[in-house]
Image (cartoon, rainbow, N blue to C red):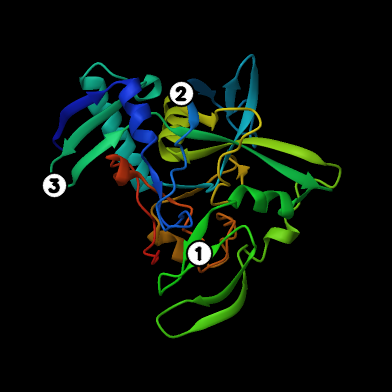
């Protein structure tokens, strides 16, 4: 195992405070100030349990019930899983278990840098459906007072659905652009479903969950983030919920190029020009836990 050195263990309260300082990478208020996805959210600990049979999803404990766990990205990379395995061995050497982690652990990995490992983060969301389709007008209301920037720094409101005179670089503009991914109107969760669709989706820690649930075969402690009040909502998540299982297992992100018809990947909520504006900037909160898998310019 590479040399990993323990630097600091943050308490649950300290970890919660750091989460509240996470910002969106490209979402702003009308004055151009960063927006905070967890500023007024409720954060608690709960447990995720392994799948009960092939094809089913792991389940998250919510009160006295268990609910299926969703993911935005059903692909697991072997090279990332090996990193998780080494981190787990490091934690065990310090009398901590990855599966039962209730704090944020800061460590230095020789030759790689400094990082944090914390319980996986799961968000609770409630969308509204009409005949199984996403109720777009109601979803737009979640973007009230939320703006994105174009290449010239102009602010555009998301709640109006269409971006007008949107600069994609310093010269070219698009006069009329739907904020949503073109697939949004055709995604259907079941024709018989109307009303609220509540789901729990992994925000950070899919590889840690996979390692613990599948390889160690133990339940895992996670951080649950949900609206503080029942009538409130978190900002919409950047990608649509899909079942956690079945997963696609690859050696690395690069190996995806070997499979030309690999058709199971994340389905972004927003169009290709702004699809990653809803990603989180963890480092703004002092957390070194995640980064974008591809280099996309975000204004």
Q: How dense is the environment of label 3, judged by Cα within 10 Å: few (below 14), some, or many (20 and up)? A: few
Element on which disc 3 rests: loop
Q: How far apart are marks 1 and 2 (CA)?
A: 33 Å
Q: Can residue 118 be seen in this view?
A: no
State whether residue 240 is above or below residue 70.
below
Q: Distance between the residues labelled 3 and 1?
A: 34 Å
Question: Which of 91 and 152 lies nearest the eye of the viewer?
Answer: 152
Question: Which of 167 and 258 lies nearest the eye of the viewer?
Answer: 167
Q: Which of marks 3 and 2 is nearer the N terminus?
A: 3
Task: Where is residue 102? Give x, y as percent.
Answer: 37, 20
Mark 2 sits on what residue? 220
Q: Earlier in the sequence, mark 1 or mark 2?
A: 2
Mark 3 in CB contact with mark 1 (< 8 angstroms): no
Residue 131 horizontal side relative to residue 55, left or right: right
Element on which disc 1 rests: loop
State whether residue 198 is above or below residue 42.
below
Q: How dense is the environment of label 1, judged by Cα within 10 Å: few (below 14), some, or many (20 and up)? A: many
């Amino acid at each position: 195992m590479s040399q990993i050195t323990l630097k600091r263990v943050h308490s649950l309260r300290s970890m919660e405070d750091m989460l509240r300082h996470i910002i969106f990478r490209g979402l702003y208020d009308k004055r151009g100030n960063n927006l905070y996805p967890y500023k007024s959210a409720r954060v608690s600990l709960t447990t995720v349990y392994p799948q009960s049979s092939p094809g089913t999803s792991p389940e998250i404990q919510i009160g006295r019930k268990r609910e299926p766990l969703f993911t935005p990205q059903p692909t697991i990379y072997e090279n990332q899983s090996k990193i998780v395995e080494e981190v787990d061995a490091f934690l065990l050497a310090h009398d901590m278990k990855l599966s039962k982690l209730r704090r944020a652990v800061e460590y230095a990995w020789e030759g790689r840098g400094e990082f944090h490992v914390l319980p996986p983060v799961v968000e609770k969301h409630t969308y509204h459906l009409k005949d199984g389709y996403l109720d777009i007008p109601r979803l737009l209301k979640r973007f009230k007072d939320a703006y994105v920037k174009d290449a010239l720094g102009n602010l555009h409101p998301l709640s109006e659905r269409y971006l007008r005179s949107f600069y994609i670089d310093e010269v070219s503009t698009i006069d009329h652009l739907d904020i949503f991914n073109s697939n949004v109107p055709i995604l259907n969760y079941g024709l018989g479903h109307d009303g609220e669709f509540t789901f729990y989706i992994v925000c950070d820690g899919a590889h840690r969950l996979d390692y613990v649930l599948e390889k160690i075969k133990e339940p895992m402690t996670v951080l649950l983030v949900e609206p503080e009040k029942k009538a409130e909502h978190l900002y919409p998540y950047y990608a649509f919920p899909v079942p956690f299982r079945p997963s696609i297992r690859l050696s690395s992100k690069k190996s995806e190029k070997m499979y030309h018809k690999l058709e199971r990947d994340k389905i972004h909520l927003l169009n290709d020009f702004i699809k990653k504006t809803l990603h989180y900037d963890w480092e703004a909160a002092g957390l070194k836990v995640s980064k974008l898998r591809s280099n996309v310019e975000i204004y």
